[in-house]
Image (cartoon, rainbow, N blue to C red):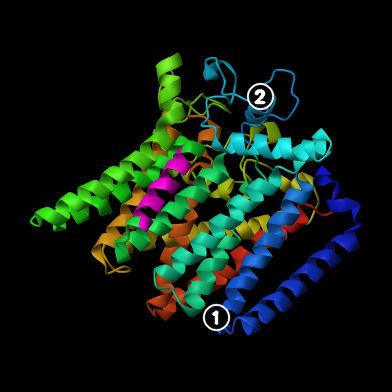
Amino acid sequence: MGQSGIMDLSRREYLVFIIFLSVGSVLVSYAAGKVFKKKDLFLPLLIFLNSLILHGFYISYTDTWVRQHDVIGFGNRKGIGQAALIEYLLNEGRLPDFDPTTRWGFFQPLLHHIIAAAALKISLLRGMNFGRACESLQILTLIYSMVFIFFGFRILALMGLKGRALYLSEALLAFHPVLTLLSGSINNDMLSHMFLVMAVYYVLKWQRGDRLTDLLLTALFTGLSMMSKLSGVLIAPAVAFLMAGRLVSERKDRERLLKRIGEYALFALTVFPLGLFFPLRNLILFSVPLTFMPEVGEDLSGYSLLQRFIDIRTQTPYACMIKNGNPYDEFNIFLMLIKTGLTGEYDYSVYNPYITAFAWLLFISGSLLFITVSILFILHLRGKLIKEVPIRMFWSILILTGILFQLRLMLSVPNFSSGDLRYIAWIILPAALLIGLKIQSGRKAAAVFIYPAGGVFIISSAAVYYLLGLP
């Protein structure tokens, strides 16, 4: 279907269908609140369902070779890309028995590709034609994105957000465009982010309740995140801090210390085999470095470090690209992260004349929220938002790890593609948390600014990605 619109609807039918589903989500959310006798269920469920509707529309008009990363496409002659890797696993039924760096996209950990190959096999056995079966793989990434949002909601509530602060944070998370884009991207990014946020949830539960089950679930989901993409290891320093804190606090109690060491041994026996199996296999068999990443995309090495940080000129809400008719390729680190997080690496103005006005609103409101979150992170480091020291340090380490990883990637691999927010898309969760905590602090000035910026961001995000599929 691609850009022709979902299910060959007319423009009027497309808009009516969106309105119909949106009204239906209100009725379902209201009925669920009544059935379960929970007044506070209405808005979270309404936000979740409308996010699902938006993501569902996005995958329905986005083919598996449109706005993808390292996928290339199914059936390509060179047999390269992550789509080809899925096909290889489907057809061969075994791991690659050759140096994975010799075929583009084959060096990635394989969990997502194994799941996708199994899903393809099931679809083909049910009689579905190959092309349609390939398109149906976006249902997997849609599920991954919605599980991410579900656990994100649980984390925001676990961190004590309530009322309007909770609802705005949930909406900012659920309607962030990077999740819309990843819900239709059939590479391994979204699965890794999903497991990482699940690990965050369970380690916070463990810190509060000290249940071995929660610790082992943290290990399981950390390992699965790394088994999806090695950057899932970014959660490790923050988790290690909480675990080390427990050891230090119990160092004088020999019995408890030995018990704790035993629990940590189980943690290690869970996380390391899952997370490091494929990278170590490639290292041992083919001498592939653990951190191997090929260069790809437009070369930005001609720009100085100063330019990459302070030159913020822009003429479009989309990422500037010479191939799209812009005079230069986007190179400023901050603009790259903002723009790729909002509209990916693409120029949507070619699809219809209505999108760009909303894309400007999305870019302006997104930039204001980016600046706001940066200021809030400084306040957070000073202990102004989270009083509980271990939890505050956990979030601080997690955020800093993500930021430093992304900066190192962008500067050590000076190509356009290394500046895409998709590598650390999970960071929108702590960003939403910081905004919610600031609102909940009771400062009216902050709320007066954040509510309008957040509202414009949410509405323009939905508008851009509904208009993108307009027939």
The residue under the point 43% across, 80% down is: 444
Callout 1 crowding tier (Cα within 10 Å): few <14, some 14–19, many ≥20: few
The numbered mark at residue 40 is 1
> What secondary structure is the magenta-colored segment mainly?
helix
**Quick one: label 1 or label 2, which is nearer the N terminus?**
1
Q: Image check: 351 left or right of 291? A: right
Q: Image check: 260 left or right of 386? A: left
Disc 1 vs disc 2: Cβ atoms closer than 8 Å? no
The Cα–Cα distance between marks 1 and 2, rounded to whole angstroms, is 47 Å
Q: Looking at the image, can residue 421 be seen? A: no
Q: Image check: 415 left or right of 400? A: right
Task: Using the image, determine if residue 222 lies above or below residue 206.
Answer: above
The residue under the point 62% across, 66% down is: 48
Name the element at disc 1: helix
Task: Using the image, determine if residue 419 lies above or below residue 193.
Answer: above
Magenta residue span: 213-226
Q: Is residue 200 magenta?
A: no
Name the element at disc 2: helix
- Quarter residue 232 falls in: top left
Label 1 sits on what residue type? Asp
Label 2 sits on what residue type? Tyr
The numbered mark at residue 88 is 2
Callout 2 crowding tier (Cα within 10 Å): few <14, some 14–19, many ≥20: many
Q: Image check: 339 left or right of 158? A: right
Q: Position of residue 102 (x, y in %)?
A: 56, 15
- Quarter residue 237 falls in: top left
Q: Kindly report which numbered mark, 1 or 2, lies closer to the viewer in this rendering.
A: 2
Q: Position of residue 426 (x, y in %)?
A: 48, 51
In depth, the one of 227 and 453 nearer the eye is 227
